[in-house]
Image: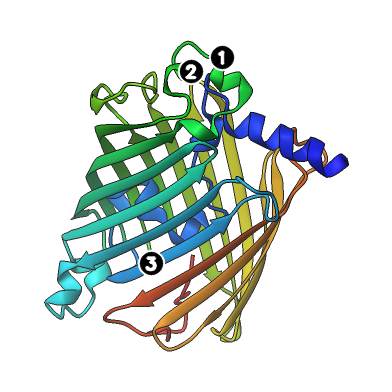
C-alpha cells in the first residue's frame, strides 16, 4: 500500500501541467558536462566524446530518465598545436539529449560554438553561443488525473501531440588551468519560436553560474571542487556543489550535494583515453521530493590526448 502511495505521488509530481518541474535536467556530475550548460566552455577540456545516463527514482515505473551524448572539437588540437588549451581560439560541439518524464518525451539538439581570447599567459576569456532545437511529444494516454482536468492538456487525452521549439543559449567564461568562472543563459528567447500544438506555455530563461578550482597536492593526490547555480522564475533555485579527490591519476572519489534536494557519492576511473564515472544519489531529509535513489553513469573519450600529466602541477579532471 505504501508503495502505491509513492507511485501516485510520483506520477502527480512528474505530470504537473502547471510547471512541468521534472523537465529540469539534473546532472550530478555537472562538472564533466560544462559545455552543455555553457557554450562558452566548449572545448575547455579538449576534443572529446561524452555521454551519461541518469535514472531518477530507480525502481518506480514512469520515473524520469535522461540520456545525453555530445562531441566537442577543439580546432587547435585538430591542427596539432603545442598548447591548444591556451593557444587555441575556436571550438564547436554537438549535443543530443533525450529526456522522459511522465507523459512527455523530449529530444534536444544543441549546436554550440566558442571563441577564446587570450588575456594573460594563463588566462582565457571564452565566449560561446548555441542553437537549441527541442522536440516534445505528449502521450495523452499517460496523463494524470490532474492533467486530464487541465484546460490546456486535457484536450490531448488518449491521443498524441508534438511540439517543436527553436531557441538560443549564450555563455561567457574566464578560464585558467586551475580554476574557471562562468555565466550562461539558456532559452534566451523564452521558447517563443515554436510550431505544432502549443501544450507548453513558454520556456522561461535559465541563468546559470558555474565555478571550479583544482590543485595537485602531490604526484599521488589532487583535490577538485565545483559549484553550480541555476535560476528560473517558475522553479526553486538549483544550487549544488561537489568535492573530489583524485588518487594516483587513476581513481577518484567524492561527495556532492544539491541544496534542499539530494546528496550523492561519486567514484570513477581514468584509463588511457577514457574516464568512467558513477554517482549514487539519495534524497535529503528536508527534500519534498520522492524517496527513491538515483543512479548516474558517465563516460568520456578523449580524441587527441591521454589521461597523463604533462607537468607536475597538472590536474586531469574537473
Q: Are marks 1 and 2 in contact (CB under 8 Å)?
A: yes
Image coordinates of residue 212 in percent, x first then y, are: 50, 55
**Residue designated by label 3:** 50
Neighbours of disc 1 within 10 Å: few (<14), some (14-19), many (20+):
some
Residue drawn at x 31%, y 58% as measured from the top left: 123
- Circle 2 is placed at which residue position? 154
Looking at the image, residue 263 sits to the left or right of residue 53; the answer is: right
Expressed as whole percent of the image width and height from the top left, the position of residue 205 reads 38, 27
Q: Nearer the viewer, residue 173 or 141?
A: 141
| Inter-mark Cα distance, 3 to 1 | 41 Å
Q: Quadrant of residue 287?
A: top right
The image quadrant of residue 305 is: bottom left
Q: How is the protein colored in the picture?
A: rainbow
Looking at the rendered structure, the secondary structure element under dot 1 is: loop
Corner quadrant of residue 162:
top left
Question: Which numbered mark, 3 or 2, is in the foreground of this view?
Answer: 2
Foreground residue among 56 and 126: 56
Residue that sits furthest to the front in the current view: 158
Residue 154 drawn above or below residue 69: above
Which of the two labelled residues, at mark 3 and mark 2, occupies the earlier sequence position?
3
Q: Is residue 106 visible?
A: yes
Residue 97 x %, y %? 38, 52
Find the distance from the CA under tag 1 to the CA under tag 2: 6 Å
Q: Nearer the viewer, mark 3 or mark 1?
A: 1
Q: Give the label on residue 221, or none.
A: none
**Position of residue 317 in the picture relative to residue 75 (left or right):** right
Q: Which residue is mark 1?
A: 149
How busy is the neighbourhood of tag 2: few (under 14 within 10 Å), some, or many (20 plus)? some
Amino acid at each position: 500500500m505504501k508503495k502505491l502511495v509513492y507511485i501516485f505521488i510520483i506520477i502527480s509530481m512528474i505530470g504537473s501541467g502547471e510547471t512541468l518541474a521534472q523537465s529540469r535536467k539534473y546532472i550530478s556530475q555537472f562538472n564533466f558536462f560544462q559545455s552543455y550548460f555553457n557554450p562558452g566552455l566548449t572545448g575547455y577540456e579538449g576534443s572529446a566524446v561524452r555521454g551519461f545516463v541518469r535514472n531518477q527514482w530507480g525502481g518506480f515505473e514512469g520515473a524520469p530518465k535522461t540520456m545525453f551524448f555530445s562531441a566537442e572539437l577543439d580546432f587547435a588540437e585538430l591542427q596539432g598545436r603545442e598548447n591548444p588549451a591556451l593557444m587555441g581560439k575556436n571550438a564547436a560541439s554537438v549535443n543530443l539529449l533525450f529526456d522522459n518524464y511522465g507523459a512527455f518525451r523530449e529530444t534536444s539538439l544543441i549546436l554550440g560554438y566558442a571563441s577564446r581570447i587570450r588575456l594573460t599567459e594563463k588566462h582565457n576569456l571564452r565566449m560561446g553561443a548555441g542553437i537549441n532545437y527541442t522536440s516534445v511529444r505528449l502521450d495523452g494516454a499517460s496523463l494524470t488525473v490532474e492533467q486530464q482536468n487541465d484546460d490546456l492538456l486535457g484536450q490531448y487525452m488518449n491521443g498524441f501531440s508534438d511540439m517543436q521549439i527553436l531557441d538560443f543559449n549564450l555563455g561567457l567564461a574566464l578560464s585558467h588551468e586551475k580554476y574557471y568562472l562562468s555565466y550562461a543563459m539558456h532559452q534566451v528567447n523564452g521558447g517563443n519560436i515554436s510550431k505544432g500544438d502549443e501544450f507548453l506555455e513558454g520556456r522561461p530563461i535559465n541563468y546559470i553560474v558555474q565555478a571550479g578550482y583544482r590543485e595537485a597536492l602531490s604526484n599521488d593526490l589532487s583535490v577538485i571542487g565545483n559549484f553550480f547555480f541555476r535560476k528560473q522564475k517558475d522553479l526553486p533555485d538549483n544550487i549544488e556543489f561537489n568535492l573530489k579527490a583524485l588518487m594516483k591519476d587513476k581513481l577518484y572519489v567524492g561527495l556532492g550535494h544539491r541544496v534542499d534536494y539530494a546528496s550523492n557519492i561519486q567514484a570513477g576511473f581514468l584509463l588511457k583515453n577514457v574516464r568512467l564515472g558513477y554517482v549514487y544519489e539519495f534524497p535529503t531529509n528536508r527534500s519534498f521530493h520522492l524517496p527513491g535513489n538515483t543512479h548516474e553513469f558517465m563516460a568520456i573519450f578523449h580524441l587527441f590526448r591521454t589521461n597523463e600529466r604533462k607537468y607536475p602541477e597538472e590536474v586531469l579532471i574537473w
